């Protein structure tokens, strides 16, 4: 089936006094979208994919869904391709503006949120706030009115190779051997699993894993406390809108990558979705490698971020489909299990695509299985 790609964009108002994106006038936000659809098939239902940093309009799954007769819109929030200063609450505003616009622009009646990878927790955060709006400030205390935004709830949520959240995933990938952020390359060898001198080698015992996980959480909380202290100092100096940037080293360190007995799945041991995890741990494209005080609190802080898929899922009631790719090198099976267990929806379904990787690149033959599962779920519910 021929697939059409229709790029478009729109502007919506944003009253925030703080600007974290490059270019454009203050008070306005440009949202870039792409509609991907079959050339000769109409639909009253659209799947809206989004991700905090966007960029997924050409994902194999997006194209395959359109080729199978589904209408898809990929919504790129204002932070497309750059999460250094990203505020997740503002991603929710952009997604909400997209949903309102597409109903007027294209006349869609039903909207499903396509939460792929990091878009899963964004979709759940959005749906939670659309059903139960509560937020009027970011975790840093800056105004962001999700209560007054008029967010329109989606009719269903698709969690497709999704992780539980940026903050929890970051914490589970933090290198716990870094004890002092000002000296990130002086590491505790007892926790440095990529160091051959580490006394703990895979398969790890339960006591070591518990110590490792506790140290990861402690490190996240130390950074959060420092960020809060820095913001307080800036505000006390008389410049409440001032911001500071900083670097976080060691963000791809997980016992899952070195020990295949952890969170067992069909994934290859010794690798992650960024390649060699030992290199990615301090490489230039690691999570939160460069960030800001406010952004850390909104998207990376374990305790402060509100985009927590498990907590958000517990407050939504629409139908939910969870698709678990069992050879995923990023979102291991426990992510899908946690999201499925947490969802409060009476109508929820878990599907496992045996042997599928994160992008359906290594096993392209499994893409039709995923598309069929999604399509069958949609048809059963009249979407």
Image (cartoon, helix red, strand yellow):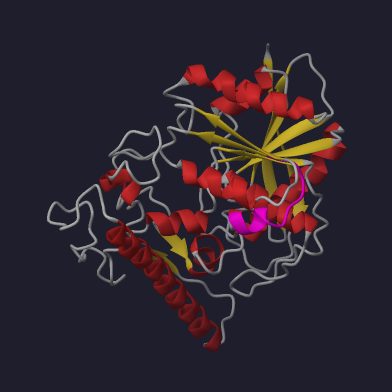
Q: Nearest the camera: 125 or 11?
A: 125
Q: Is residue 298 visible?
A: yes
Marks counted in the figure total: 0
Q: Is residue 288 visible?
A: no
| Magenta highlight range | 310-320
Q: Residue at 32%, 43% (x, y): give it.
A: 261
Residue 259 coordinates in the image, percent (x, y): 29, 45
Residue 119 coordinates in the image, percent (x, y): 59, 44
Q: Residue at 78%, 38% (x, y): give it.
A: 111
Q: Nearest the camera: 285 or 322?
A: 322
Based on the displayed image, in which of its 4 quarters is residue 59 positioned? top right
The verdict on residue 283 being magenta is no
Compared to residue 139, the image places residue 230 above or below, namely: below
Q: In the orientation shown, which residue stands out farthest toward the front?
A: 206
Compared to residue 324, the image places residue 214 above or below, namely: below
Location of the N terminus by quadrant is top right
Compared to residue 311, the image places residue 61 above or below, namely: above
Residue 36 coordinates in the image, percent (x, y): 68, 26
Based on the displayed image, in which of its 4 quarters is residue 190 positioned? bottom left
Q: In the orientation shown, which residue stands out farthest toward the left?
A: 197
Location of the C terminus by quadrant is top right
The verdict on residue 311 being magenta is yes
Q: Is residue 320 left or right of residue 207?
A: right
Q: Residue at 27%, 55% (x, y): give it.
A: 205
Residue 96 coordinates in the image, percent (x, y): 75, 50
Q: Residue at 49%, 57% (x, y): give it.
A: 168
Q: Is residue 144 left or right of residue 207?
A: right
């Amino acid at each position: 089936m021929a697939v059409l790609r229709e790029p478009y964009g729109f502007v919506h108002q944003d009253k925030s006094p703080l600007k974290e994106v490059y270019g454009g006038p203050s008070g306005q936000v440009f949202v870039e979208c792409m509609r991907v659809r079959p050339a000769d098939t109409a639909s009253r239902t659209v799947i809206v994919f989004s991700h905090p940093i966007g960029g997924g309009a050409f994902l194999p799954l997006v194209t395959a869904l359109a080729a199978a007769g589904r209408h898809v819109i990929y919504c790129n929030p204002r932070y497309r391709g750059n999460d250094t200063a990203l505020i997740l609450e503002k991603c929710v505003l952009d997604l909400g503006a997209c949903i309102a616009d597409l109903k007027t622009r294209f006349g869609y009646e039903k909207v499903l949120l396509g939460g792929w990878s990091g878009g899963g927790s964004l979709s759940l955060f959005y749906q939670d706030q659309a059903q139960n709006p509560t937020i009027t400030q970011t975790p840093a205390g800056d105004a962001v009115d999700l209560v007054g935004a008029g967010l329109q709830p989606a009719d269903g949520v698709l969690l497709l190779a999704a992780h539980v959240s940026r903050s929890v995933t970051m914490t589970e990938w933090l290198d716990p051997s870094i004890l002092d952020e000002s000296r990130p390359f002086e590491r505790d060898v007892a926790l440095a699993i990529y160091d051959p001198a580490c006394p703990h080698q895979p398969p790890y015992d339960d006591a070591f894993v518990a110590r490792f996980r506790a140290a990861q959480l402690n490190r996240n909380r130390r950074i959060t406390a420092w960020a809060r202290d820095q913001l307080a100092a800036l505000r006390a100096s008389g410049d409440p809108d001032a911001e500071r940037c900083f670097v976080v080293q060691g963000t791809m360190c997980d016992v899952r990558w070195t020990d295949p007995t952890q969170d067992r799945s069909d994934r290859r041991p010794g690798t992650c979705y960024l390649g060699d995890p030992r290199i990615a741990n301090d490489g230039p494209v690691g999570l939160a490698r460069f960030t800001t005080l406010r952004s850390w609190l909104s998207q990376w802080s374990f305790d402060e971020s509100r985009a927590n898929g498990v907590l958000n899922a517990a407050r939504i009631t629409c139908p939910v489909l969870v698709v678990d790719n069992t050879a995923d090198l990023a979102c291991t099976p426990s992510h899908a299990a946690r999201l499925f267990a947490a969802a409060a929806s009476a109508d929820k379904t878990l599907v496992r695509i045996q042997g599928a990787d994160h992008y359906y690149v290594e096993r392209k033959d499994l893409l039709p299985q995923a598309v069929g599962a999604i399509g069958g779920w949609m048809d059963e519910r009249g979407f």
